[in-house]
Image (cartoon, helix red, strand yellow):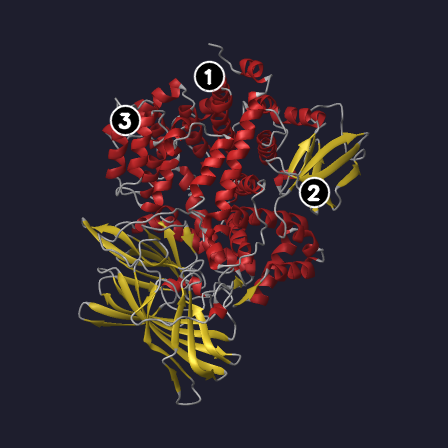
Amino acid sequence: MNLLKSFCACSCFGKKESPSSSTSHDRLSEPTSDFKGQPRLPRFAVPKRYDIQLKPDLAACKFGGNVAIDVDIVADTRFIVLNAAQLSIDSGSVSFSHPNSNKVFGTPKVGMVEADEILVLEFAETLPTGMGVLTVGFEGVLNDKMKGFYRSTYDHNGEKKNMAVTQFEPAYARQCFPCWDEPAFKAKFKITLLDVPSELVALSNMPVEEELSTGNLKTVYYEESPVMSSYLVAVVIGLFDYIEDHTSDGIKVRVYSQVGKANQGKFALNVALQTLGFYKDYFHMPYSLPKLDMVAIPDFAAGAMENYGLVTYRETALLLDDLHSAAANKQRVSTVAVALCVATVVAHELAHQWFGNLVTMEWWTDLWLNEGFATWMSYLAKDKLFPEWEIWTQFFDHETSEGLRLDGLEESHPIEVEVNHASEIDEIFDTISYRKGASIIQMLKGYVGGPCFQNSLATYIKRHELSNAKTDDLWAVLKEVCNEPVDKIMDSWTKQKGYPVLSVRVKNQTLEIKQSQFLYGDSDGHGQWIIPITYCCGDYDSSKSFLMEKKSETHDIKDFFSDNNDPARSWIKLNVEQVGFFRVKYDDGMAAKLRYAIENKCLSVTDRLGILDDSFAFCMARQMSLTSLLTFMAAYKEELEHTVLSNLIKITDKVIRIVADARPELMNYIKQFFTSLFLHSAANLGWDPKQGESHLDAMSRGDIFTALAMLGHEETINEAISRFNAFLDDRNTPLLHPDVRKAAYVAVMQKVTSSNKAGFESLLRIYKETDLSQEKIRVLGSLASCPDEGMIQEALNFALSSEVRKQDAVFALAVSKEGREVAWKWLRFASSEKGKEIGKFFANRRNASIERTLKQSIEQVLINARWVQSIEKDKDLANAVNKLAPNKS
């Protein structure tokens, strides 16, 4: 599943849903208390095959069904315990039969434990061991929560219609049919859809076996699936167009979209065809199903879902309109306008067809085996298909940097995290499982080498195909194939939270290194890691690597150090190309030489980016003053590389928000300095696309001009508004390319006030007129950038209106610093009092699925509060920003 979530609710044209999470046609008896509060289902009964019949009613927003489950009774028991939630169980339909006799064990006591989402069936006598068939009838609601079996809406010929969609990961199959809803209970699935309107497309994991029509309705029978986990079962019913093609080995691949949008799936289809071939070769294992469908769903909570053979996506993650898509959404076609978002998500979900679907984690503790590997594999695929994209530099910016940010919190968690209840699963679909997971995979691959790593993964897939695996199973294969102590090394990265910071200095031509846990707060971390380290001195022609196993080590570098007198060759860089998941703090002398190397472009793009990222982290952790950080950032004034510029922009935004609280009297000087950082790249890029430029330059253009508009740069704002006005007159004008449209929208909002709403109203008109999801999100992400508090309130109200799909409302929360008061009526953004206020607000709103996220948010507020206090005491800051700002007026 691609990491993109939102929390929302809506209604089905006024129909009221059942408030009960589990009901029955008959009164259910109280279940035996022995099964309450258990983290896992008992294993005395194991499912082997499901025969599921579903009858959805799209008009009434409900469904009925029946499931016959082949169950292996492996121990003496009178009970069958499985999962069910928000279903009405027909207790009279429940029975168990044994194939070796004519006896039917009917009318059991049927009980539901709503808190644990389990269905307990108590039979009058002990069930015979061996295979039997459990039959259960049920009914449910096509909900509006974007999970379980739910409804999505779309417009067709001016009429609002429903489609039915499933989203079962992590534990929502139980909301569609009773099942053993845990990844270890793999089984075969035979799906039948009843009374489907004949004009609709009905899809499931497997190809259609038979379709029978009766009047305006049809029954669709699907082929039986291979064994898979319940969270991968999928059904989609709606009105779609599609395009299709075949892989070289005959796999039919289709992209489904709303009617009239089929051509927007061409790019995703091309990426899918190439990616399936690449993964087949890389894993030495072909794609295991006869077809692959990819479907764009209008209402979708995540970015995408890897259902076996039927992958579902948000429209923005699958569809691409060539005339209106910015480079940031087009980074994966063969040439200039490649679609980054689409290709990343498609490659991620298709990696799951091997890592997750074919080989599945045994329990959610090992979720990272699914998500970390799918994230990493998506970059490997893009790099293979399109090497000109410099994708591994973006890997550090998008994955490693974000992983380091969250894992520096005390409230982080290990990659392998205990999950003791289904309600806890949702919250580990986070940066640690995805981004830290992917980052330590990249680090391990760098240590053992690419060919050995690939052979290990192919062996792992073959050994555990159609089964389940744990993290230790992967380490065992890597240790066996690579002959390295992989388990010993990697346990220090997956079984404890956090990561190290290396404090480095050179003394008498000896490199002295000490490791300690990096934390943003005041706590003392006690972690210790086995760290694969690389370093180079003065150039990249040669580098050294070693495994750091102690708290502190020294390494002789006199034979490695080339020319200590040449400033361009006297620098030392640890963690070459930022492959390792750790930070490096250099002593003052080493840092000064690295600054010179940055100014003179002696370091690679990724290393310039990594040093900048570490410096900002040290400043936020109050291990470096803001004065020192800003002085260091001046070394990047002539930076032109997209990933470094992107990181600079993120840092400027965060610093401005903190300085607004700590030293508001310095804001003008700070803005002037930050503006000066971007003017060189802005002049180099210009507003209009250039023939033959890279997609990275196209992405930088939009980012740079958006940043300058937010900084209040009048020349940028005036030019943007002029181009925006031309766009209002002619939607096809070349003056406002999609790459800079967001910058223009933000610039327009800088001039909007409660008494002058023209720009705001123009943007709302653009939002309502377009049927392109990407354009709607561009507008939403701009509205709250306005400095006028009254207009921010209007923007937030619009985000919660019926005009905005529920999963898109989150994009409107990109508020300006002035909007923080409106967003949460804050007196101050970063204060200890604010942390207490947030904690008090949520005290009576506890939910296991957000418990850790809430604690992390409160910790971040308190970190910001302490950062503000340190900046207030920075006596050198005023003088420094006066010198750094190019204009003193």
Q: How many callouts does the rendering have?
A: 3
Q: Amino acid at mark 2?
A: Ile
Label 3 sits on a secondary structure element that is: helix
Whole-percent x, y for residue 710 in the image: 41, 25
Whole-percent x, y for residue 432 in the image: 54, 47
Residue lying at 45% horizontally and 38% vertically, measured from the top left? 838
Where 305 falls versus 217 (above or below)? above
- Residue carrying label 1: 668
Q: Earlier in the sequence, mark 1 or mark 3?
A: 1
Q: Residues within 10 Å of mark 2 (few under 14, many from 20)?
A: some
Q: Amino acid at mark 3?
A: Gly
- Measured in 3D between alpha carbons, the distance from the residue under mark 2 to the one under mark 3, in whole angstroms, is 53 Å
- Measured in 3D between alpha carbons, the distance from the residue under mark 1 to the one under mark 3, in whole angstroms, is 25 Å
Q: Is residue 134 visible?
A: yes
- Residue carrying label 3: 759
Relative side of 89 to 424, left or right: left
Q: Amino acid at mark 1?
A: Asn
Label 2 sits on a secondary structure element that is: strand
Where 432 falls versus 90 (above or below)? above
